[in-house]
Image (cartoon, helix red, strand yellow):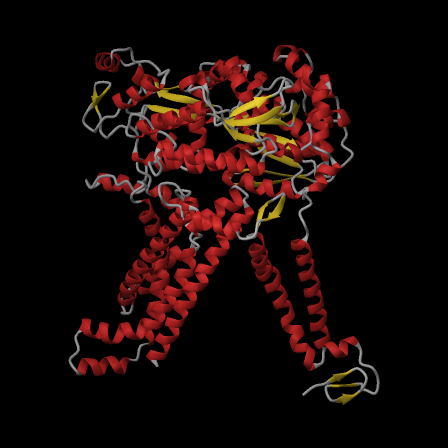
Amino acid sequence: MKRFLILLLVVAIAITFSFVGCAAEEPAAEEPAEEAPAEEPAEEAAEEPAAEEPAEEAPAEEAAEGEVFSLEDIPEIENKSTLNTIVETGSIFDETLPYIEKFTEKTGVEVNIERIATPVVYSKENVELVAGTGVYDVVYVETAWTDEWAKYMVPLADLAAEYGSVEEFEMDAAYHSPVIMETCKTDGAIMTLPFYSYHTGMFLRDDIYEDPTEQANFLEEYGYELAPPVNNEQLTDQAEFFTRSAGEELKGVPLEKDMNGITMQASAYQANDEFSTYLWGNGGDYVDVIKDDSGAVTEYVITKENTDLMVQTMEEYVGRVQYASPGVLTANFDFVIAAVSQGDTPIVGMMYGNCFAWAVDELNQNVVPNDPDARLGIYPPIGKGPYTGAWSFGVAAASDNQEAAYWLVRYLASLEAQTAVMKEAGQLATRSDVLDDPIWYTEENQYPLGMLVDYLNDIWNNQDYIDTIANAYYFNSESAGKVTEMHMNTLSKGFSGELSPEACIESVNRQMLDLVERHDSIPIRVEE
Amino acid sequence: MSTTKNDDVTINNVDLGRKPSVWEVLSSEKYFKWMLIIPLLLVLLVFMIYPLIYSIFNSFFDADLSGRVAVGLKNYKDMLRDTDFWIPLRRTAVVTVVCIVSEILIGLGIATLWNRNFKGENVIRGLILLPLLVAPLILSIVWNFLLEYDIGFINQFLAAIGIGRVKWWAPSGALFTICGITVWQWFPFSASVLLAGLKSLPKDTFEAAQVDGAKGWQVFRKLTLPMLTPLIMIIVLLRTMWLIRLFDPLYGTTRGAVNTELLDWMVYRTSFVYFDVGYGSTLAIMSLYLTIIIAALMYRQLIKALDASK
């Protein structure tokens, strides 16, 4: 018996020591870089004209002339080892999983999918990527993280050269929104391919805006026509105009409950997206991104002009909070959608475009039975600088099956998978050929999907906006992942009044200096 | 007494007449007892001592995931000068005091009611214990929805009965909403512990007090409360340690906004959002020191209370 116990103890000790070994092991941060140097391929890709030019010169129309990549185009994959990836929880991947199973059927490569809540995707993936564990073969990337994680991923053109055709890859990549593709590149090299988008927009109750009584009353009170607001003054005026108590009239009918002029998401969850939208709309950014003649970022500068614009944007935002529900201070997108779709507000100043169909569906269930005219519209947010959001996929440098990972990324961004994203999962595809499908303009789909498609096409064809995104701090920075989290936290303190606008922006600037100095290879300075 | 002498070839007082094998040495009484606790010690070493020492080590470095540079006591100096540290620390103290006082008062009240026989008592006890059985994060997310201003059930209910909506998450009151959620989840713990205490109180002492003419409040103040003091001290001790590390209700509701950032949220934000591991470790170690100091002080009080109750 004793011998058996001793044997058991020896095994336990061995296991424990193996834990010690694991825990004590230094993160192999250098290894992935050594195995697949991130810098070099990126530079090579940037130097190699073939990597850049076709993407710029081959618009979707030209690309459409070629064969569209599909599952059948994936060649025999030699490396059959299982792929691992991480994605968000949520219905979109419920609908996408069958397509990943199709990939497995076709290639014989199993795919393990870890699903976790969106707020923890960044920290979980970041630890694994920095440590070079290779746990995730396929990296799930939000647009603001591309540059930060570029050194842990392989430029997709390099993989295309090794496992397929660069020309075909770039031709297929050209189908995606040019705006989103700007966020998928680092130093000109495509690091990820987008999967679904959440470009933001402004949601308005069209039926209220078009009501003759409301239009006449507004004209009388404010001296100009009631129409979708195009500047901050108009947005605030309209938020004030529509703030009403129960018993007051809306469209000539007494309200049964209070109505808030506007709703916002001022919580510490995604407050930065809303602020970014208004800040970009005002013509500012968190810092100026300085580039050299080759387009490489050389410096970030905290300018007086941007600081003033941030304070101004914060003041405008706080000025509108008084016309919003007190709940906005802790509201996320779900509460905002609930507010508009239950008839509690006619204006959502900024909301993710992929929530539009959901909001319409909810409005149809909650408000339309009592008000058959109730209808939502989607418009550009003030200043036409919507937050550019997309989730995309890249291939980890530390992956031991980059071949299969590459083809999975290609497939997830393909016409077939993206069509499923829009038709089955109800999210917004990033491919022009999906958006060009006439199905969105049928009588059944025109509202809301046709409207959404028109809105996205408008954004994607706006060159000013494309230039803004190409030069925005979030999409030209290795430190953006950390900074966005700081922005969520600190900006929400400004929205709620915990910090004054000046103190809030001063805190944002101070923390940006610290975070950028700590986490970015590009220097930052304050303008003298 | 066992002895193991490789040269004398005796083991457990038995002369083997040869050199003992490894098995025989390890199974001797002298070493076997150590063999039994070594796995536990190793587990403690790996999962408790090592991370703790590693955190203390990191607190002397400017560290992130990619590397570290020694900075001596800079992180500690920065912390003491950082208003972003003192404000959450003060809030943590407020939350700790408010929650503990509320939980003990409510718990004592509930335990007193429970300490009677009534129909359906087991069902009611089971229901009251339910919040303790659910993950705090899930509960806080549910409360976030229930307390939402426009669509939250509680406000809709209050509006329906004419009271009107309450700004549960207004900057002036959000911290107390967090306290409310925490108290709601944890008062059953106090109630359960205090009920056990009430059940174990000596009946003859109370009967004697009644004979002497003591009234309800006098009995409670002079007898019940002193006898329950050691248990109350245990609750205070445990809850203080847990409340200093309060995190879940923030994650599920305000995420540290609207004047609710507490010490552990700051540790999380610094370490796992900004990945400023050095400063985050410093904050975590400070949280640990505070917990140890407060726990040690309370432990002394607990021992005194136990001595007094003997």
Q: Residue furthest right?
A: B18
Q: In the picture, which quadrant includes the C terminus of chain B? A: bottom left
Where is B16 relative to B302, above or below?
A: below
* Side of A510 where B220 appears, left or right: left
Residue B90 rendering spot, x and y as whole percentages: 36, 52
The residue under the point 37% across, 38% down is A330
Percent across and percent down for residue B280 are 51, 49
Please tell me whether residue A237 is drawn above or below residue A412 in the rendered image. above
Name which residue lies at 55% across and 19% down. Answer: A179
- Which residue is at the front of the view, A364 or A56? A56
**Image quadrant in which you'd find residue A319:** top left
Above/below status of B299 relative to B56: below
Question: Does residue B136 appear in the picture of this structure?
Answer: yes
Q: Pinpoint residue B26: horizontal percent, then vertical percent.
A: 73, 76
Seen at 53% across and 53% down, the residue is B73
Extreme residue toward the front, this view: A528
Q: Position of residue B67 (x, y in %)?
A: 63, 45
Q: Residue furthest left?
A: B213
- Would residue B264 be found to the left or right of residue A34 on screen? left
Q: Quadrant of the N terminus of chain B?
A: bottom right
Q: Is residue B155 left or right of residue B32?
A: left
